[in-house]
Amino acid sequence: MQFFIPVSGNSKKGKGSGKGTLKWWQLSLIGVGCTIGTGFFLGSAIGIKITGPSIVFSFMLAAFGTYIVYNLLAKMTAEDPQDGSFCYYAEKAYGKWAGFSAGWNYWSSNILIMGSQLTALSILSRFWLPNVPLWLFAAGYAILSILVVLTGNKGFDKVENVLAIIKTSAIVMFIILAAAAIFGMVGGDAQHAGIPDSANQLFPEGLRGFWSSLIYAYYAYGGIEVIGLMATRLKKKEDAPKAGVIMLIVLVVIYVISLGLAVFMAQHGAFHEKESPFVTALGQYDLAFFPHVFNGAIIVAGFSTMTAALFGVTALLATLAEDGNAPALFSKKLKKFHHLPLPSLGLATAGLLVSIITALLLPGKIYEYITTAAGILILFNWAFIILSSLRILETKVMGKVMAFIGLALIVAAVSGTLAEKTIRFGFFVSLMFVGIIGIVAVIMQKKVWEKENHSAD
């Protein structure tokens, strides 16, 4: 792939402007599938523990911030569709170092997140088979995920569409059961927390807790980068913003309603990080089947987001290699495997293996720090998307104001991790990754890119 950088008024199109096959609603459905994961089904419990019922407002703020980021990414995609998505636009706006940094930043964060998801899947699977070793579950899910990616674009789309329906149906099922329980249609002896009638009830941990909870709300919307990478496959590239808006509307509606019901039904102190808030909310009712069904739904959600991340990093590393930001070997594609870059998939698999071993060997708290750092790294990429759009797009004053609001929300979410001591170390781990990538970018700038520029002159 060649990045599109205007030179002396002339421009050169890279890949990505060809005719796609996806309709906008299909991309929206894939977006839902790539987004709903353990970050919502499990991570939201930590957010509720930190801030209480105000988690609903955290999710609404994060949705607004996510909309700003996706809308700007979609506009850049519609104007100049490219396979490299946000990496391409970062380089177009700020130069080689930016594209290189955005790409490897995203790759690193997703490798860590995949390992975290895989570990979560293994632990959840022991709900039914407690004597099976974690590594055996992890290996099985990893192999299954790789097989899905090997089916190529069409196979991946079909699998993600089915998993998206299952995950969404699970949340809808909770909403229906919760409503039935509230209206006395389900047996059980439960005392509801009810609607908060004071600031102390709404923010039981104060504004500091609300601030720290933003990162968990953003976790639940993570995945738009994969949609940005796939937007070039739309039949009509101009439909990219619409696909994102519909995707976010669906997510916000089901997220806010389900979380609102959960905090209405259960007391603040009942929620903890080892159990989904939806299982906690219905735990006082005669619904013995629900923990089993919802545990299965969480496994489906985790597998879906892990597979989407694997698909995304495989495609991205190939585009980085084609542009010289990674060894050329990783761009090699084989027709036998639907033109997939197998060396790129191989490196992602190796990184995934290391991440799994780390997750299984290190104590839980240490790995929580690593996964927190991965989430922060993704938000750094979102900031890159906004900053790139400010240079690339011709936006009016209101558009720029929205962009700066999006940046402010990202800064709030990232800095909020410093306010919560249980995840604070993750912030410094993320800075370590940024530092390593930055050092490599400086070396590349002096040793490679400057020489290429001189040769071009």
Image (cartoon, rainbow, N blue to C red):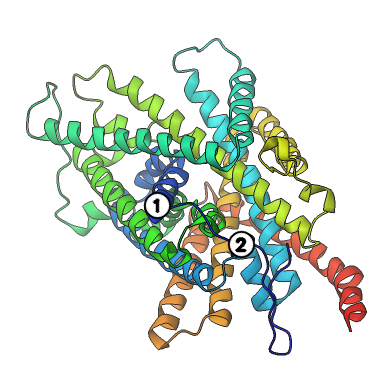
The N terminus - image quarter:
bottom right
Q: Is residue 177 above or below residue 392?
A: above
Q: Position of residue 301 (x, y in %)?
A: 44, 35
Residue at coordinates 51% horizontally, 58% vertically from top-left?
A: 231
Q: Residues within 10 Å of mark 1 (few under 14, many from 20)?
A: many
Nearer to the camera, 161 or 351: 161
In this image, 70 relative to 443: left or right?
A: left
Tell me if residue 323 can be seen: yes
Q: Identify the element where label 2 is drawn.
A: loop
Horizontal and vertical percent position of residue 30:
44, 46
Kindly give the residue lying farthest to the top in the view shown: 131
Q: Quadrant of residue 287?
A: top left
Classify mark 2: residues with Cα within 10 Å, few (<14), some (14-19) or many (20+): many
Q: Residue at x 50, y 85 (%)?
A: 394
Quarter location, residue 200: bottom left
The x and y percentages for residue 353 are 71, 32
Q: Quadrant of the C terminus?
A: bottom right
Residue 381 rendering spot, x and y as whole percentages = 59, 62
